[in-house]
Image (spheres, rainbow, N blue to C red):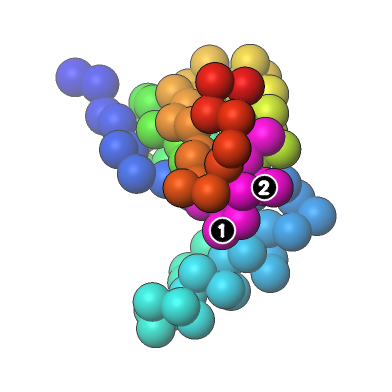
Amino acid sequence: MTIVDAHAHIFPSKIAVKATDSVGAFYDVGMRYVGSPENLLESGRAIGVDKYFVHSVATTPAQVRSINTFIAEQCAQHPEFIGFGAMHPGVEDIQA
């Protein structure tokens, strides 16, 4: 049987701690792990996860392209990842 984590957020290493803390504060939830790709893979291996739907959230239109580039790069590096693109309602050129 394949085990899939259907909702995992990942962030670039340089902002992973801050982004994880911000998400936890926003939802008033204690965060157990930093949302880096490496931490996700490590914690998932420990419980037998085979695949991960990975996401990140664009809080401004300007973040969409860099987030989607990051997710695509991580999916290319880690075949366990299935990427979901970020979108923001303020993006002017949706097709791009």
- Against 85, residue 80 (above or below) is above
Residue 1 lies left or right of residue 26; in this view the side is left
User: What residue type is disc 1 on?
Assistant: Thr
Tell me which segment is drawn in magenta. Answer: 57-65
The residue sitting at 71% across, 38% down in the picture is: 66
Q: Residue, x 54% and y 20% (percent of image)?
A: 95
Across and down, in percent, residue 51 comes to 39, 26
Q: Is residue 26 left or right of residue 92?
A: left
x and y percentages locating residue 46 in the rendered image: 43, 43
Q: Residues within 10 Å of mark 2 (few under 14, many from 20)?
A: some
The residue singled out by tag 1 in the image is: 59
Q: Are marks 2 and 1 in contact (CB under 8 Å)?
A: yes
The tag on residue 63 is 2
Report the quarter where the N terminus lies: top left
Residue situated furthest right in the rendering: 14
Image quadrant in which you'd find residue 28: bottom left
